[in-house]
Structure formats: C-alpha cells, structure tokens
Amino acid sequence: MSAAREEILRRVRRSTRDVPGAEHPDDVPVERGYRKTDDTPRPEIVERFAERTAEYKAKVSRLSEADLPGAIRDALEACGVKGLVVPPGLPEAWVPDGVKVLRDGPGAQLTNDELDRSDGVLTGCALGIAQTGTIVLDAGEAQGRRALTLLPDYHLCVVREEQVVGLVPEAFAVLRDTVVGERRAVTFISGPSATSDIELNRVEGVHGPRTLEVLIVG
Amino acid sequence: MTIIRHQPEKQAPPDAFSKGRTPTFEESAKESLANSQLRRNLGKATQTIRRKRAVAVAEMPDWEELREAGRALKSRTLRHLDDYLVQLEESVTRAGGQVHWARDAEEANRIIGGIAKSHDAKEVVKVKSIATDETKLNEYLEGEGIAAYETDLAELIIQLAGETSSHILVPAIHKNRSEIRELFMRELGVEDLSDEPPDLANAARLYLRKKFLSAKVGISGANFAVAETGTVCVVESEGNGRMCTTLPPVLVTLMGIEKVIPAWQDYEVFMQLLPRSSTAERMNPYTSFWTGSSQGSGDGPEEFHLVLLDNGRTDVLADEIGRQSLNCIRCSACLNVCPVYERTGGHAYNSVYPGPIGAILTPQLVGIGQSGPDSLPYASSLCGACYEVCPVKINIPQVLIHLRGKIVRHKQDEGGLMGKLDPENVAMQAMGRIFSNRKLYEGAQKAAHIGQWPLAKNGTIHRLPGKLAGWTEARDLKPVPEQTFRDWWKTRGKGSPSNGSSGDGAS
C-alpha cells in the first residue's frame, strides 16, 4: 500500500487520540428523531407529488392507464419529437406510430452523438418523492443508462401512482437494494436543468433536458 | 452565433492556498467596501437567498431533528475517520474503482495529472469542486499542457474573467448580466448576444456541449461518499455534473477525507439538509449517485478514480474544538446570513472558503502564523447567526473565539520579545489587569472621562490616538458617559429618581 495512505491514516489516528480506544463507531449516539414515513392518505401524497413537481416548471398531467398511449403521442407531437430514444424494457404500447424509434440496449448502444442529435427520450422511473417533487431513476427497467435522459433536450417520464412515496427517507429505503445489491447508478431529478448563477434569476435549461414532462398514471 | 475555440489562460489571483503572503481581511475589505456595484449585487443576492431559505426550512416540522442527526453523523464519522476511510476504499475498489491517497495539494494534482496523461487527454471537463480550487489543479494541469474547462455556468464566468469565486454556491455573484454579456462576447467570440439570462445560459450550453461530448476525462468533486457502499454523490442544478460524471470514459473525483459518511441510509439526512440550506429548494434539480465504475454495464465511465485528500484536514481534526469545522457540507447558508460577508463579499477573505465557515476553516487548514489567514477569525461580530442556520450545527462563534485565542498565544510564543511587546498584546495585558481590579477600573474610568473630551464628537469617538488607533480603525467607540452605572448605583435612593435621570446611565 502507498506511503501516502499509511501516513494519512497515521495522522488521522494521531489526531483522534482523544477518542477512547474501546469506542466503536456505533457507540457515538445518532438520534434519528426526524420523520421516516408519511401517513398522509395516498391520494393526497400523489396530489402533492403532482403539485410540487409542477412547481419546478415541469409539465405535469394526471391520467388513466387507458389514456396513456394517447397522452404520450400528443405530448411528443406537441414538442415536435421525431427521433425518440427508447430505453430497454419500455412497454411497446407506449411507443406511438410515426416516430423514428432510437432503441438503446445492451450490445446495441446508441452513441453519444446519436443521443445528442435525437429530439427526446421517453422513460418510466424507479419512484417519485412527493415531499420534494422528485423523480428518481435507477437505470432499471424502462429507464436505461444515464446518458439517455441527459443528452436529449426533451424528457417525457411516466410515473405510476404506486411508485410515489411520501418522504425522502422512504425513497432511500426503497433504493437500498438497487445500490447495495446491484451497484446501479441513481439519479434524482427535480424539475428541468436550471441555473440561478446570473443575478440569481432562475433559468430553466442549461445542460440537461430543457423540458421535463411528467405523466402520472393512476 | 459563431463560437471560436477558447483556451483558458488567465490565472486567478493568489489566495491563502497559494504560495506567498496574502493581504489581511481588513486590507482587502477596504477595497471590497469601496466597490458599490459589488455591494449592490451582494446585498440583493444574500437577502434573496436568506428569505427563500427561511421559507424552505419553515416547511419542515422536523428540521431541528434533522440538524441534530446531521451533526451526530458527522461527529461519529470524524471520531472514527480511519475506519470509515478504509471501509470506503474497500467498497470503491470492490465496485471497480481505484482509490488514491494524497497527503497534500501537490500530491493530489500529480495523481490527477498522471491519470489524464495516461489517457493522452489534452482537455478535461470539470464540475464545480472547491477541493480542486484549493489544490490549484487548473493551474497545475495548464503547466502540464492540459486545458481544464470549468462547466458550471458561474465557474465558467469567473474562469473566463480570470477571477476567483466570491461565494461557495454562486461564485459569480459579484458580476451582473451586462458584465457577463461583455465577457461572453469577448471570450467565447459570440456575436449578437443579449444580456437576458436565458440567452447567456444558452451561449454556455452551446459552447460546453462539444466539450462534454469530446472529453476523455471528467473531473469532479464529491458532496458525500458512503463508506458502506462506496457510493459517491454530486449535488447540482445545471446538468453539467451529470455530464461530467456520466459521459467521459474516465472519471476522477477529488474529495476531502472529511466528506465520507457511514451508510447509504445517511443520505436521507444530508439530502434533506443540503438543498434547503443551500439553494433554498426542497430538492436541487439533479443529484447523481454512482458506485464504482461501469463494470461492463455501459452506464457511465469505464474507469473511476477516487482521490482522497488530506491537505491540512488531519490538523483540523486534531483540535477538539476546531474539529467540528469538518462537519461542513458546503451549503453556504452561513455566508448569506453573515452581516460581515453581506458587505464585504467573498474576495475579502482571500480564500476558496469565504464567509464565516471560511474564517474558521482557512486558518486551520493552512496553519496558524500567517498574517492573511490569521486575520480571518476577527472578521466577525460574533452575532451567532451562522450557528443558527448551520445544518450540521457547527458552533462557528465558539471556534472563532477559540482560534483568536490560539492566534494570540501563537504571537506571544513565536514572536519572542517583539511578540510580547506587541502594542496590542501590551494593551490587552494592561486591560486585563485594570478590569480585574475595582480601584484600577474606577480610576481608569475617571481618567478616560477627563482625557476623552478632545476625541468625542457628537457622542462618538471615531478615532483614538497613537497606538490605540487600531481599535477604532473598523469601529466607533462610545465615550465614557457623564454618569457611569457605578456612579448611579451609589447614588440611587438618595433623593434622585430610582430609575436614574440621565439617558446614558448604563455604561
């Protein structure tokens, strides 16, 4: 092992000499007195998710399963999406006729340039967080790898009502197996890309998709 | 719009982490205070964020419980930092990443430069990382023939302007839209650019998109890294963080050793504390969590390097009172509430860490005994607003006072006879004797009352004479009143009204 490693660890040990040798990390008390679950009735949680996602300037609609294919077609049309990126595992019924489908999958990956030239991407998600209006992607079914939702300028995301959790701690609990077991990457998306760097004026759309549209299916 | 190729070449001015002496806070603050444009921008910015943050925090019924959990988790981590660092190394390695250890800035830069060179990279894309500002990585890479492109909009602005950050969160807070427009037109070769923020942001998008797609190496900082799983996290708004950590085939992350947290579950605490304290949002637009390298999944960089940086952090750790400074999650809430920062801005601190947190972190990281950093713990009225908003409960005023004590003792110990005869030291020793003896104190009050008449104007002393002038350089002094509290106390109940008659009775 490197000399730097040994020296830094030696310095750390010297600097924490005041810590009793018998003390175990878990002996340092951590009170987790904050809220862990939200017992608000489900319909209110879903409604809060819709409201708060919309507050970040994402377009949000609520609809039934039966109306989903039509809503997807309308949304893509309204944004002029011709070349649509489709991740592996996306239900075939979601993909409308008449768009050019750019399919990504293991063994047949789209290049970054192809993604950059596409008009938009259609995905599902891992879960939604009502408390913060956040969509969580975990590179799983119907989401694909991270570049797919990053380079296209338009992201249309389908969230099922049962995927919405109330609070932030609930989300991290659900994601645990994905991260610990499969080491998949996780991305939190709360509204479209934004900056407030110029005189603190919020500008939607810097480097990620400039338009985020969310369809909540119940 | 035409875009010409731009090579970052302007060097940022030196700061506490560069070689050589930096000015003191007092010297630099004078310049900042004279810049009325800067003061207007800062006033607007700090007040806006402050107001929004209060709203975002008020929404949380369990905010105090979250703060306490955040503090406790950091305390647990720091007390057992060696265990957690070794665990983090194991987790990252198991997930296909490589871990490097850097004792100081030079070592970190050499490691990162070496990785870039091994991939023949002439250009690297960077996402905002204060740790790399601390190590002066960009200057180092430039010397090695590698151009480092800052991709955060504000960082790009200050890189193009050859300036340094004035705020942890919004580094270009000191520049207004027309200054940015001129800068982009000149440095990016953009024609027909308006000064509307969306147009300015779009100019940056077009310019940087090509860099993201072509760069072989991305460089990032880290907000947190989990020892249990090796999962590293970057919290951001613009999407440049996602670009830098996803697209280039090689990713190098530089993080201070204090950024490790114990377990995946602990994100539930910090990901609630950080966005609301920082940008006053319920959640920031984008947060990326990744664990090691892509390992054949095709998702993200094939090669991931994590560089663990000490650079003075273990010295901070050794001080039992100063140690809490390492709790910092770089939210910048303390900057926005600080009455000193609001007026002087970040540049007066001459450090990549400005504001109240910078005033305690900088002198501890670089070591006491340099006039510039040593002046920082005095850049405070000790009002305590920073402690109240800190999401990980760093008692900044306590550390400020502790450091003032250390600095004075250092001057006494290291300064030899000159240190002991230092006018401030002599004056403070004399004050100490007078304040601890009633007769001396009363006598001094009388003497001051008689002696002060040529100095007091309209009830205020603006300037003391001779060696005492230092005291009034940055503050006014109230003269000793006609009737002191002690005089009033002796005469109470002897005919005069019991609440005292003179308006300035309490002194």
Image: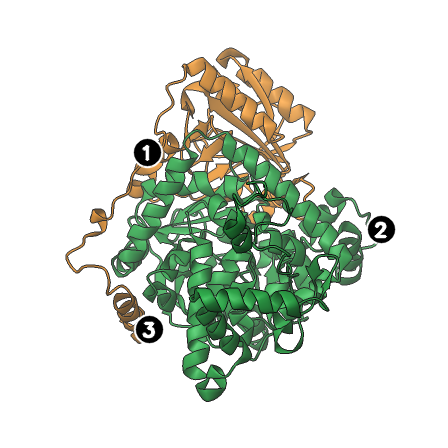
Instruction: State the SS at label 3.
Output: helix
Q: How would you rate the neighbour count of disc 2 (Cα within 10 Å): few for under 14, some for 14-19, many for 20 or more?
A: few
Q: Is residue B249 left or right of residue B24?
A: left
Q: Provide the chain ID for the residue under circle 2.
A: B
- Disc 3 marks a residue whose amino acid type is Ala
Task: Give the answer, above or below, for where B418 lies relative to A185.
Answer: below
Q: Colour of chain A?
A: orange
Q: Does mark 3 fall on the same chain as mark 2?
A: no
Residue sitting at the far right: B192
Out of A58 and B484, give the one closest to the viewer: B484
Q: In which image quadrant can residue B265 be found?
A: top left
Looking at this rendering, what residue extends furthest in the bottom direction? B417
Disc 3 designates what residue?
Answer: A4
**Disc ID at residue B192:** 2
| Residue tagged 1 | A33
Chain that bears disc 3: A
Instruction: Quote the CA–CA distance across marks 2 and 3.
Output: 52 Å
Residue B166 pos. (x, y %): 63, 58
